[in-house]
Amino acid sequence: MRLAKNPVYRKEIVPWYDSETACYIFIAFMFFVFLFGFLGIMVAYKFPQYKEHICIPVFLVISSLFAGLSTIIRLVRRYKAGSRESHKRI
């Protein structure tokens, strides 16, 4: 008897870098990068000689915000898909 190619009980294998723990660590790291960039913006506004270098902390803030939010959206979609699958089994 042949096995089904896609049995219902088989879970999707998630790579280690896309696991929940790795995503939470990445979100925490992006939070600290966001704070670092925000403090850089504050220092650049405080000292006039650093105003020409404000683009670097602005880039850090924008990129960390984008990366953190995209990871949060990925986790939310995963939780929603998981909750739908658990309701189908009942």
Image: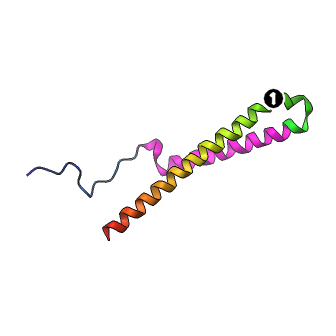
Answer with left or right where residue 63 lies relative to residue 5: right
Q: Where is residue 28 in the image (x, y as percent from the top left)?
A: 62, 48
**Residue 56: which quarter of the image?**
top right
- Which residue ends up furthest to the left in the rendered image? 1
Under circle 1, the secondary element is helix
Rate crowding at label 1 as few (under 14), some (14 to 19) or many (20 or more) other CA atoms within 10 Å.
few
Tag 1 residue: 53
Vertical placement of residue 52 versus 12, above or below: above
Query: Residue drawn at (32%, 71%), measured in percent from left and top?
Result: 90
Answer with left or right where residue 68 lies relative to residue 87: right
Query: Residue drawn at (90%, 28%), measured in percent from left and top?
Result: 49
Query: Residue drawn at (51%, 56%), measured in percent from left and top?
Result: 76
Answer with left or right where residue 22 lies relative to residue 61: left
Q: Residue 78 or 35: which is nearer the viewer?
A: 78
Q: What residue type is labelled 1?
A: His
Q: How many labels does the image show?
A: 1
Task: Give the main secondary structure of the magenta stretch.
Answer: helix
**Residue 8: which quarter of the image?**
bottom left
Q: Does the magenta stretch include residue 23?
A: yes
Q: Where is residue 85 in the image (x, y as percent from the top left)?
A: 36, 62
Magenta-highlighted residues: 15-43
Q: Does the magenta stretch include residue 63?
A: no
Query: Residue drawn at (47%, 42%), measured in percent from left and top?
Result: 17
